[in-house]
Image (cartoon, grey):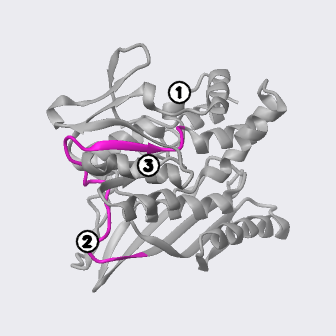
Amino acid sequence: MGQFRTGKIPSDILVSNVFRYKGHSDPSVILGSSIGEDAALISLGDKVLVLKTDPVTGTASKIGWLAVHINANDIACRGATPHWFLCDLLLPERSNARLVDTIMRQVDSAAKDLNVAVVGGHTEVTPGLRRPIAVGCMVGLVEKNKFVTSSGARPNDDIIMTKSAGIEGTALLATDFGHKLKLDVRTLARARSMWHSISIVRDAMVAVETGGARAMHDPTEGGLLQGVWEIAEASNVGVMIDQSRIAVREETRRICKLLKVNPLRLMSSGCLLIAADKENSNLIVNRLKKRGVQAEVIGNFTSPRKGRKLIQADGSIVEIGPSERDELYRVIESR
């Protein structure tokens, strides 16, 4: 067995060596760990508790702010409202109070944006770290029988994408590597400002309130294509998406070209994928646009025997498989 590279553990290892260990069997668990399902569901009578934990490891910038939003995003993908947040801060040796205060100010600001209470966590200096790591845990609530999963997509459903591909990755690259990129000041500033587009809580709430959303997923590591593959894998369906319909901002295109990065395989927090029945997909898109959220139908789900495919810009068709790793980590390791 080979050693893992930076980034997500391969999907087959998750299935064989992680998801099988479930501890005590608890009938209140509606949904636990599986491919593409990023938040657990626990029955509480007429309410369902939604639980999510995720770290921020790919950057030292805005990690407190990111920890809140990326965890809240997965709660919202369940159709739930995020309410309570816990944060573990793992700090390098020789850290100081100023660093802790900076990170926690970011946590506080992001939590206030979402009306979320910060209720606990843990802070320590950890040997061997080169930069701080924030591990977030978000808790939300949704009414019984109103939650959404990643596994609800059906053949013939449309797949809606909000905003653009590579939002989080673009902001990270512009912030951490901007001084090395041959880009004008305005382009870098716009790329860095993409931090403010990372929340998909509003996008998800609009989709749920409109009706017809069968599945929702927030593509993070591995980018848009990984997110599409994960919905298809969780739902046991095929998918066909059209690259010409996938929005990629000019700032993302330019940074990805300079770094030889595929924007469709770059961290995409801030983009929401929605599987919607055809009768409601256009209504969801229109309502998102009225709320100021860019949205587009980029393809549709198919029978599993048709595979998972992307129509490229030149018209050729390629298979979509699970991502080996996010493009961001390749850039980090090469610099």
Question: For the residues marked 3 and 1, what is the alpha-carbon distance in whole angstroms?
Answer: 29 Å
Residue 78 in sight here: no
**Marks 2 and 3, the one that precedes in the sequence:** 2
> Tag 1: residue type?
Asn
Residue in the foreground of this view, choosing between 74 and 23: 74
Would you name the residue on which mark 3 appears? Answer: 286
Image-based side of 6 in relation to 21, left or right: right
> Tag 2: residue type?
Ile
Circle 2/circle 3 CB separation < 8 Å: no
Would you name the residue on which mark 2 appears? Answer: 30
| Image: 204 above or below 157 | below
Image coordinates of residue 6 in percent, x first then y, are 53, 41
Would you name the residue on which mark 1 appears? Answer: 262
Segment tinted magenta in the rendering: 141-165
Query: Which quarter of the figure is the C terminus placed in?
Result: top right
Image coordinates of residue 224 in percent, x first then y, are 45, 39
